Image (cartoon, rainbow, N blue to C red):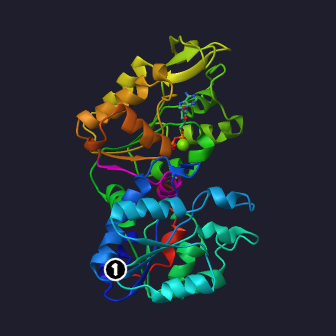
Amino acid sequence: MNLLKKTIRDYDLNNKKVIIRCDFNVPIKDGIIQDDTRIRASLKTIEFALDNNASVILLSHLGKIKEENDKEKNSLYPVSVRLSELLNRKVIFSKETRGIDLEKLAYDLKPGQILLIENTRYEDIPNKLESNCDLNLSKYWASIGNVFINDAYGTIHRKHASNAGISKYLPSGIGFLIEEEVNKIDGILSEKTNPFIVIMGGSKVSDKIKVIENLITKCDKLLIGGGMAYTFLMALGYNIGSSLKEEDYLDYCKELLTKYKEKIILPVDSLVSNSIDSKEYVIKDINNIQDDDIALDIGPKTIKLFTSNLKDTKRVIINGPMGMFEKSIYENGTKEIYNYLANNNIKTLVGGGDSVAAVNKLSNPSKFYHISTGGGATLKYLEGNPLPGLENISDK
Ligand code: ADP
Ligand code: MG
């Protein structure tokens, strides 16, 4: 369904004022951008509009604005400077998110010029107009342009004035970033090649329930590692010691394990320690875990079990690391599983903020079909529900 949305290529941009909603939510410390990946990722869409003789008006949020004090440290001004360097063009910056000065800057903007408007979440004080998708604010922003392009994939799961709102009031489409994410995710989900295996890990069952519920109906096997595996093992009656657990979800895990008995595969051994800060661990079979053991990575038998299930598989979606990979002594399970996927040319989609960090740190990202940049947005996508940021985009 998402593939039927208009894209930036479907519009004649010549002499038009094109509003592009970007994701410039970059880490900034003391006014200095720590990582400009997201700014770089927006260039293709912005350059396309400039090459097609549009005037470009950019909107983005940055951080959260809950009180007046949050404004200065979350100003998009440093982004305007970096963007200007990357595009090798002047970027005009509007300190206002609304008002006569902004209107004049937008009105005077010529084809080939770029205007970046201050953090849309400045409008969250006092009445959360941006985050609650206030329609008057949406209409106001829409009024300064002719076409709206949403390219902020990271906020596609949010219904804000600067994405879902504006697209109600202007001819609208998606930019290259969103198009790629949507095509890749829809693509791997709708393909009919099997076996299709889903690998879930990370910390909590509660974060991933809806993703599990959606994907388990579609996949042939679900391999569960990471911290969330231990709530499932506990539901089967194992002593999981002091490992991560969510007792409120035991019944849910039990139900799932009964209903999908043949599909779900759980760890059979783990690296355990008495403290997460200890420099040492012991490998234990799951039925041998003691009260003060904390399971922090999957063990060698589990790696074998998981990779043997991955043999001959055609498609994989993986979300969540297999262990506490931030600590190098617990990175091996995650590394082995990702490397197996990479080295065997298995068509793999990686989603989730920590999973992306893990694949970049431990494996070879170029060997993967798609590494989704969305974090929370991708998880929402994998839950299978309509995405608010796309709902009002014009259909093809
Ligand atoms: P993603 O961001 O990819 O969706 P999550 O946020 O769900 O992944 O989970 C990532 C976190 O899970 C990491 O910080 C990692 O340390 C933690 N984790 C993985 N395995 C375990 C474990 N066995 N015990 C505790 N934490 C774990
Ligand atoms: Mg995470």
Residue 50 forms part of the magenta stretch: no
Say if 204 sits above or below 134 in the image: above
Residue 205 location (% of width, % of height): 59, 40
The spot of residue 260 in percent (x, y) is 49, 41
Whether residue 375 appears in magenta in the rendering, the answer is yes
Report the quarter where the C terminus lies.
bottom left
Residue 118: name its quadrant. Answer: bottom right
Coordinates of residue 158 in the picture (x, y in percent): 57, 65
Q: Quadrant of residue 97?
A: bottom right
Residue 115: where, in percent of width, then height? 46, 76
Q: What is the number of callouts on the image?
A: 1
The answer to whether residue 87 of the structure is visible from this angle is yes
> Quick check: 145 above or below 62?
below
Q: Note whether 379 is above or below 395 in the view shown.
A: above
Q: Quadrant of ligand 2?
A: top right
348 and 362: which one is in front? 362
Which portion, as a residue range, is magenta? Answer: 369-381
* Quadrant in which the N terminus appears: bottom left
> Horizontally, is 115 left or right of 234 in the view?
left
Q: Secondary structure at mark 1?
A: loop
Viewer-proximal residue among 266 and 203:
203
Q: Is residue 9 left or right of residue 225?
A: left
Residue 177 appears in the picture as rendered: no
Q: Which residue is mark 1?
A: 112
Check disc 1 and give the amino acid type.
Gly
